[in-house]
Image (tube, helix red, strand yellow):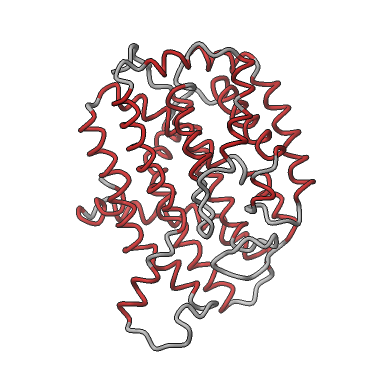
């Protein structure tokens, strides 16, 4: 077990919720992107809005894995290994499969309207449904996080005295900054060739850095001290990132393995972890409301968004600006409404939310 008890900090919950909000905004822009990134709907929107994708994509999922690693540290303080494993299955694996089979098939159904997924052959409805469920959308995060959690348990079994965590707590600010180098190196490792969202190397490193490095109060205090400077640097690098890569595929290796991209994402993560301590360390009725529904927002939003986007662009002749203005509030409101319904249905809420 860890050597000290780390109190729960509101700003970690707020970082997680704010990042999920950014994920929703990103997906509204992404599905109509003009940057050559494959989407379920091959319709180009307003190219200038792609700048949001270039600004967010390098770091927002990395940040979620960092926070997930920190949360795993907290969780293991009050749970045995067996309890932690069972909780991971309930909160990650059950919603992964439940989300794929109950909602995720909508992603494949929409895609089939634009791509001949079966080569023109007549296919039984059940086969179509099973193929559609393979289009998992953002559910990949749940699967990736589960695998990393299992790897973490293995590491902790090898290091039962938590010496790695103790050693990581001695890192000074120069070493934390120099972690940019292994972050950059990890961008080349264990990337799947087709399913590009599974960037196993960098996401695994981020999760472990969260668990072993950023769970230390002393290290967080160093980031807090220089938070504003980090934020200025990160925003500046983000502007350069958008300018340099705009028009290119921002999910390509040429972008994601570039030193500029990795320096930018590392600076942004340090900035957010520092600034959140100053400005997001609070809790009120609104934050509690969002926190309770944040997982549902993540799991539910994409199939609802893709289906609505398909219906609007197919059956309504609207300018793209109007499409964005409709889809943006819909992408927030529809998952919340669905949560209020699903959370009251015992079996379904377990399959989709692990409740």
Instruction: Reply above or below: 287 against 97.
Output: above
Residue at image point 50% right, 56% down: 331
Q: How far across and down, in percent of the image, does residue 333 sit?
A: 47, 54
Q: How far across and down, in percent of the image, does residue 109 sit?
A: 44, 73
Location of residue 86 by image quarter:
top left
**Residue 307 located left or right of residue 149:** right
Instruction: Reply above or below: 22 against 211.
Output: below
The number of discs equals 0
Residue at image point 58% right, 30% down: 182
Screen quadrant of the N terminus: top left
**Residue 91 located left or right of residue 145:** left
Front residue of 355 and 169: 169
Residue at image point 52% right, 60% down: 194
Instruction: Reply above or below: 105 against 92.
Output: below
Q: How far across and down, in percent of the image, does residue 275 sit?
A: 60, 24
Location of residue 284 by image quarter:
top left
Q: How far across and down, in percent of the image, does residue 353 sit?
A: 31, 49
Residue at image point 39% right, 47% down: 142
Screen quadrant of the C terminus: top left
């Amino acid at each position: 077990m860890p050597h000290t008890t780390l109190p729960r900090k509101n700003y970690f919950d707020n970082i997680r919720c704010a990042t999920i909000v950014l994920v929703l905004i990103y997906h509204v822009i992404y599905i109509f992107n003009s940057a050559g990134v494959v989407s379920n709907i091959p319709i180009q929107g307003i190219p200038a809005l792609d700048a949001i994708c270039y600004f967010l994509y390098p770091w927002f999922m990395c940040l979620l894995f960092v926070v997930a690693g920190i949360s795993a540290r907290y969780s293991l303080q009050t749970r045995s290994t067996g309890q932690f494993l069972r909780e991971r299955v309930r909160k990650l694996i059950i919603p992964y499969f439940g989300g794929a089979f109950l909602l995720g098939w909508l992603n494949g159904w929409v895609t089939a309207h634009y791509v001949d997924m079966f080569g023109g052959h007549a296919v039984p409805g059940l086969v179509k449904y099973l193929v559609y469920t393979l289009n998992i959308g953002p559910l990949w995060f749940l699967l990736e996080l589960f695998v990393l959690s299992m790897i973490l348990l293995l590491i902790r079994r090898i290091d039962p005295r938590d010496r790695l965590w103790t050693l990581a707590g001695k890192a000074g600010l120069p070493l934390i900054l120099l972690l940019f180098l292994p972050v950059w190196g990890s961008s080349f490792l264990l990337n799947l060739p087709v399913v590009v969202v599974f960037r196993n190397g960098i996401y695994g490193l981020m999760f472990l850095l969260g668990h072993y490095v950023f769970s230390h109060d002393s290290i967080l205090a160093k980031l807090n001290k220089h938070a504003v400077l980090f934020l200025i640097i990160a925003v500046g690098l983000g502007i350069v990132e958008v300018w340099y890569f705009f028009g290119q595929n921002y999910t390509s290796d040429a972008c994601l393995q570039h030193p500029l991209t990795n320096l930018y994402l590392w600076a942004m993560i340090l900035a957010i972890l520092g600034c959140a301590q100053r400005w997001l360390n609070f809790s009120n009725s609104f934050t509690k409301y969002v926190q309770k529904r944040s997982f549902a927002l993540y799991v539910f939003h994409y199939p609802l968004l893709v289906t609505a986007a398909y219906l609007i662009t197919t059956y309504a002749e609207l300018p793209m600006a109007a499409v964005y203005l409709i889809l943006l509030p819909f992408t927030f409101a529809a998952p919340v409404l669905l949560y209020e319904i699903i959370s009251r249905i015992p079996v379904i809420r377990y399959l989709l939310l692990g409740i």
